[in-house]
Image: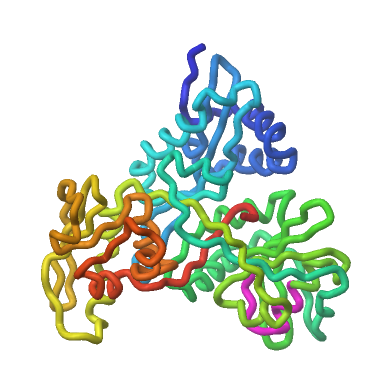
């Protein structure tokens, strides 16, 4: 049986929806249909594995950006991965992911991220690189009352641009952010799965995305500039305290959320993939140079080596300048060569820095900073992260 891996066509839509409804859920299929029939959506971003006229497997990648400091690069969020039960075990998801990766440069995307099955996507070059935010748990009857003078309502079409802009601005409270587009927020507004809500009161406002799953409620993408804003969103999302509510924590509003309930760490992480970490480092040279310039020790300069064991990256540094990056061959003994060694499946964690270079080296024997330790810790410090996820991780 010949199976074709290609972008979806309009004729594929019924088959795609059938697969998603069967393997993910009817509501998810309704959401997928909104996307696939939206004239603003580039259908070349939605791929299928098809035999004759039957869709066997499918996956989509939505546009986004990775921002580190003041530098942003194109990124893509992978969603709606599903395979017919009768077609499982044939390597179709691998082929779909290969196609997504092969076409990434055409879309201007250097990074992909996904929330998915435990371990599964590591087989396709993904790395658990950024921790999933914890949850603030609000039980039935525990939600605060609606603050006086406050109200919460669904956002309308004309407000989505402002909502998307506010989400991007709130993400800037973190050193690293992965975010979607205004178009994605309009999909959420139209989706049967979510409510995009706006809270307004005498001295503040807030934004959130509510997801209802059976009897539970989830509050995601919270923006709150006061305790009352967080309380109003919590009251509305929990239906005046009649539902259990899980609130995804977030850096900017965390003080207000922690006043409602302590954060419970997830212990999970987002999958990320960088096909070419050196290219990402090249793009991040202004950020790295700024970190070098802020170094408090003696002035430093030299030629740095980061070995990925099977390949290596070199760059000059000094006088507050970095690079350019140079791609070189394997250096299996980087410490004796005066460099640092980083396992290739940990390089994304190094660049995005939730642990920093020192923390990463403390956990992993194949991350060894060597005599470059001070330089590596300066260039790759601990960084805070803000990640936008289509689904609840």
Whether 188 is drawn above or below 304: the answer is above
**Hey, which quadrant is residue 301 in on the image?**
bottom left
Residue sitting nearer the eye, 318 or 198 = 318
Q: Position of residue 351 (x, y in %)?
A: 35, 62
Q: Position of residue 358 (x, y in %)?
A: 35, 70
**Hey, which quadrant is residue 14 in on the image?**
top right
Judge left or right: residue 39 versus residue 156. Answer: left
Residue sitting nearer the eye, 151 or 267 = 267
- Looking at the image, the residue that sits furthest to the left is 302
Q: Position of residue 359 (x, y in %)?
A: 39, 69
Residue at image location 48% in from the left, 68% down from the top: 385
Colour convention = rainbow
Residue at image location 68% in from the left, 38% down from the top: 24
Residue sitting nearer the eye, 344 or 197 = 344
**Hey, which quadrant is residue 369 in on the image?**
bottom left
The magenta-colored residue range is: 222-233
Judge left or right: residue 3 versus residue 26. Answer: left
Residue at image location 46% in from the left, 72% down from the top: 384
């Amino acid at each position: 049986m010949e199976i074709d891996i290609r972008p979806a066509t309009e004729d594929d839509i019924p088959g795609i929806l059938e697969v998603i409804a069967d393997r993910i859920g009817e509501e998810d299929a309704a959401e997928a249909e909104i996307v696939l029939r939206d004239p603003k959506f580039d259908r070349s971003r939605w791929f299928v594995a098809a035999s004759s006229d039957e869709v066997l497997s499918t996956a989509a990648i939505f546009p986004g950006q990775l921002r580190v400091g003041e530098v942003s690069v194109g990124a893509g969020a992978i969603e709606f991965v599903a395979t017919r039960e009768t077609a499982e075990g044939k390597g179709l998801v691998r082929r779909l992911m290969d196609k997504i990766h092969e076409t990434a440069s055409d879309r201007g995307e250097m990074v992909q991220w996904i929330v998915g099955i435990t371990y599964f996507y590591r087989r396709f070059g993904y790395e658990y690189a950024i921790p999933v935010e914890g949850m603030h748990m609000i039980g039935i009857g525990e939600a605060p009352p609606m603050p006086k003078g406050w109200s919460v309502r669904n956002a309308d079409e004309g407000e989505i641009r402002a909502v998307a802009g506010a989400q991007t601005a709130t993400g800037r409270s973190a050193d690293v952010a992965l975010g979607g587009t205004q178009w994605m927020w309009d999909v959420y507004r139209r989706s049967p799965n979510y409510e995009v809500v706006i809270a307004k009161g005498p001295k503040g406002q807030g934004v959130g995305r509510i997801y209802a799953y059976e009897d539970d409620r989830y509050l995601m993408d919270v923006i709150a500039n006061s305790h009352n804003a967080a309380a109003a969103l919590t009251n509305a999302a929990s239906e005046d305290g009649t539902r259990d509510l899980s609130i995804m924590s977030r850096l900017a509003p965390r003080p207000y959320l922690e006043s409602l309930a302590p954060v419970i760490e997830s212990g999970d992480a987002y999958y990320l993939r960088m096909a070419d970490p050196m290219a990402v480092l090249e793009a991040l040279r202004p950020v790295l140079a700024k970190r070098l310039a802020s170094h408090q020790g003696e002035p430093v300069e030299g030629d740095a080596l980061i070995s990925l064991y099977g390949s290596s990256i070199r760059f000059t540094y000094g006088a507050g300048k970095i690079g350019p990056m140079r791609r070189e061959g394997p250096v299996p003994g980087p410490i004796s060569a005066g460099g640092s060694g980083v396992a290739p499946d940990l390089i994304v964690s190094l660049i995005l820095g939730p642990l920093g270079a020192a923390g990463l080296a403390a956990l992993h024997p194949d991350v060894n900073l060597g005599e470059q330790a001070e330089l590596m810790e300066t260039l790759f410090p601990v960084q805070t992260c803000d990640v936008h996820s289509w689904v609840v991780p």
